[in-house]
Structures are given as structure tokens and as C-alpha cells.
Amino acid sequence: MVNLGLPASIPNRKLQFHDNIDFAAQPSFNNFTPLKSSSLKKIIGMEIMKERFKVKGEALATEIKELLKEHGNKKIGEVHLSQIYQGMRGITGLVAETSLLDAQEGIRFRGYSIPELQQKLPKAEGGNEPLPEGLFYLMLVGELPTDEQAQHVTSVWQRRSHVPNYVFDTIEALPVNAHPMTQFVVAVMALQTQSQFAKRYAAGMSKKDYWDAVFDDSMDLIARLPRVAAYIYRRKYKNGEHIQPNGLLDWAGNFAHMMGYEDESFKELMRLYMTIHADHEGGNVSAHATHLVGSALSDPYLSFAAGMNGLAGPLHGLANQEVIKWIFELREELETELPTKDQISEYVKKTLSQGKVVPGYGHAVLRKTDPRFTAQMEFGKKHMPDDPLVQTVWNIYETVPPILQSLGKIKNPWPNVDAHSGALLVHYGMVEYEFYTVLFGVSRALGVLAGLCWDRILGLPLERPKSVSTRLVKKWLNGEDEIWGD
Ligand code: AMX
């Protein structure tokens, strides 16, 4: 990893709320050593990523213009009345370059499946899991990065990771029992004052430079999120005993460290977690909300906060906390650490009879076991095969699908990403399940912000689909030609 000459960690030192240090601005800070010229070169090399993105983005923008000139009137589908009442399922209405979801296969990032990414993306020294930095490069540039290119991303995120003190003050103004996602979104909004896009727009930035400012904001925001998220975690669950960043670590490894987890295999889990939760094409609530709000030229901070408010919903990202809560309640009610499949089956039926969903199961698009679930299962088999909670997740996997299938109305009875993640985190002692969606949010930033960069370089316009009232629908059905609703 690149050594930026940042100070080593000071674990478990109780920091003052104002003890957030801008390392770059404080050369006299203890242990500070100047940047080595090789590190500097790598940072400058990072500008190459921006350049590559510019070349790729502008080329695709030109290609799309030609494509639309020739084929713009081609029909790509039709819309049924039921679809507009049912969450627009199956209506193709968005472009997202970063990843594509196949109902049977699962997610592919720029054509690569999750097992392929685990094989092909750069790793941390001595590690086996992919570096999320590499995935970000792939989503942005469309090419697999070399080890050095992934390290460039690490270095630049380290360099941009300073969080101003007033952001911590803003978090501190909230009651400590505020949901971590509320604290997270408030912190992102506090960071918004840092937006380059907002400043440059106010100063009269040209349209052709929008992408450049969005790129800079996205890089800053991604760099800062682990610090903010770790601060919320330590504030809420560890008596406000904060841990300083370790400039020798990669983005996810440093995040684990700042939350207080030094186990190497937890760092590996964070690398995997941050990679597999990053993106799920464009129509999911967090990606779509970010894209929609960004289409109004709201800056990346405002747009990302909108996406995170969506992720905080129980049918989307909050499902991961719901899953582990549901399993804890199951264990408590049955007074056993390892419920049998029959006991699980009874509990599932009880959940359904109470009019609740089985969290972690089902998906709006996927129609098979989520490969992100499988990747986590493989991690569990490798690192903690005997953990009773992890085994319970696997027993649930064998029990739930046939029950859901028997109901006849559920389109996908298989587990999604959220069905597994909590059990792995609990294994390492991260039992505070209310925090899990924040982890998801830090990861999701990679996909939705890479997506926002693409939106602006492609010059995508304000999103404004047409809506209708039921009154109008009824008139259509009666063959009346009225265009006004209510
Ligand atoms: N348990 C019980 N009922 C379920 C169910 C589940 N896990 N999944 C779907 N259903 C029900 C729906 O509530 C709906 O019932 P209704 O007709 O009475 O309203 C019916 O089955 C048909 O739903 P669907 O078309 O199969 O799913 P959808 O596209 O409407 O919703 C999802 C998808 C994910 C919201 C849904 O499967 C669900 O609520 N799952 C549980 C929550 C969850 O795990 N969310 C995480 C999703 C992944 C993510 O974003 N992180």
C-alpha cells in the first residue's frame, strides 16, 4: 500500500469532538513524514483516472448522440396499465453504465460477475478479497485496474479524507439514540457546504464542466464517508472513544480500523462487503433516488443524501438490520442458539401469519439466490463454518424458499444480499445491527456516485416521467380522449 506519511493509528484514545486533524494541513503533527516522491507520482497518476474517464465518457456521449439520431424512434418495449400501479416493475426507463442486473444470473459490474471480480480485482497485500477501490475504477473507467491503479485510488481517497470539525459538531447535536442512518444523512448534509459543484455552479460554470465538478465532489465524499460512519459507530456504541485513521491502510481496511476492528479477516470482510454492496444497476431505490435528484443538478452531497434516505427504508437497505433482529428474536423465543429446521419453519409461518415479510428474502428483479448472498456464504464457510448464527442463516436458506414458494404470490423466494451480512458481522462482535445500513450506505456510495459522474459526462437531462390520475385512466378505458386528470 502507498505510504502517504500519515501518522500511525492511536487505538482507543478518547478524542475530543474537535480532535479531527487535517493531516495534510498540519505537517508538524506527531509522526508526520513528508510525502515520498513515489507517492506523489502515484497521486498525480490518479489524475490519469480522471483523464481516462473524460476520454471514455466523451466518446460514449458522442456515440449515444449518433445512436439516437439513427435509432431514437425504435420501440424497446411496451407498458401495461398494471405496471404503472405496481412500482414500474419491468419498465425500462433508465440508463446506468456501472452495472447490469440479470434476473437469473444476478449482478454484473461492467460485464464481470461477483466471482470473477473476486478473482480479477486487485487485493490488499496478503489478502484474498477484492479492493473496493478497484471496483470503483472499473465502474468509472470500464476497465479492470492494475494493482497500481487501485493503489492510486487508495492514495487519493486518503488525501481527500479530511472531515471538517463542524461535521462532527453537527452529529453531536443529535441525540445519541438517533438512528445511525439519520446521523449519517445529517453528516452528509453537513458536508455539503464543501461541494465544489455547488460553488462552481453559483460562479457560472459551463455545462461541459459539470462532470468535472461532480467527479471531484464524488471523490471527496467517498474518501470522507468511512471517517464519518466510524465516528457515528464509536459515538453511539463505544462511548465516543474515537480512533484515528491509519494512513497505511486501504479504504475498507482503514474503515474497519476506525470502527475498532483490527482482526485481519474482519478487514477482508469489509473489503468484500464494500465491493458486493456497491451497485445493483440503476432502478433500485438508492441508485434511482441519487440519479433523480442529481438530474436537477443538485450536487453529489444532496443527491447521495437522497439515495441514503431511500436506503434507510425497510424494504431496501434497512432489511439487513431487520434480518438479524428477526433471527435474534427467533433464538430468544425458542431459547436456543441453533434452532432446528422444523422450528425455523414454524417461526417463518408465524411471521407470515402476522402479515409481515420474511426479511432478506425476495427481490424486485432477481429470480434466484443472490450471488452476493453466495459470496458471503463462501466467506462464512472459509472463516467461521462452526458459528451457530452463521449456521442458522444457512438453515434458514434451506427452509424459507419452499414456504414462500407455496404461497404462490411471491415472485422470488430466494435470499437477497441482506439475508447473510449481519451474521458475519456479529461473528466479529459487531452486534449493533441498527448500524448495518450505514455500512451498506458507505459501500453504495461507490456505485451511485460513479453513476452520477456518468450522468453528467453523458449530459443526461432532468428526469421527468409522465404521471396520470386514475380518473384519466378510467376515461382512457372508456375510450374518452380527455388529457386532463383531476
Ligand atoms: N416475505 C413475505 N412476503 C413477501 C416477501 C417476503 N420476503 N417478498 C415478497 N412478498 C410478498 C409481497 O409483500 C407481495 O405481497 P402482496 O401482493 O400481498 O402485497 C407479494 O409477495 C408479491 O411481491 P413480489 O412481486 O414478489 O416482490 P416485490 O417486487 O413487490 O418486492 C421486496 C420486493 C424485496 C420488497 C420483497 O420481496 C420484500 O419485501 N422482501 C423482504 C424485505 C427485503 O428483504 N428487502 C431487501 C431487498 C434487497 C435490498 O434492497 N437490500
Image: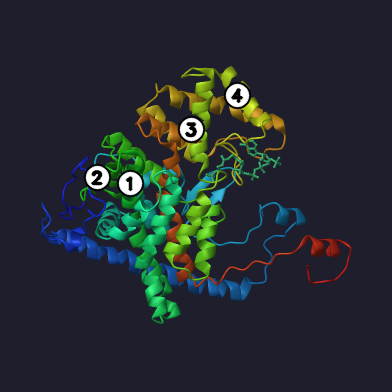
First of labels 4, 1 by sequence position: 1
From mark 2 to mark 1, how far is it between C-alphas? 8 Å
Compared with 348, 215 (above or below) is: below
First of labels 2, 1 by sequence position: 1
Residue denoted by label 3: 324
Q: Which amino acid type is marked by label 2? A: Ile
First of labels 3, 4 by sequence position: 3
Q: Taking 44 as reference, is 134 left or right?
A: right
Q: Which amino acid type is marked by label 4? A: Tyr
Q: Which amino acid type is marked by label 3? A: Ile
Seen from the viewer's position, the closer of residues 38 and 80 is: 80
First of labels 2, 3 by sequence position: 2
Q: Which amino acid type is marked by label 1? A: Ala
Residue 344, image quadrant: top right
Q: Do we see residue 418 in this rendering?
A: no
From mark 3 to mark 4, how far is it between C-alphas? 14 Å
From mark 4 to mark 1, how far is it between C-alphas? 35 Å
From mark 4 to mark 2, how far is it between C-alphas? 41 Å
- The answer to the question of whether label 2 and label 1 lie on touching residues, with beta carbons closer than 8 A, is yes
List x then y, in percent, for residue 18: 24, 55
Residue displayed at 58% across by 18% down: 343
Residue displayed at 48% across by 38% down: 321
Residue denoted by label 4: 347
Residue displayed at 15% across by 61% down: 26
List x then y, in percent, for residue 259: 31, 42
Compared with 237, 46 (above or below) is: below
Residue denoted by label 2: 243
Residue denoted by label 1: 230
Query: Helix, strand or loop at disc 1?
Result: helix
- The answer to the question of whether label 1 and label 3 lie on touching residues, with beta carbons closer than 8 A, is no
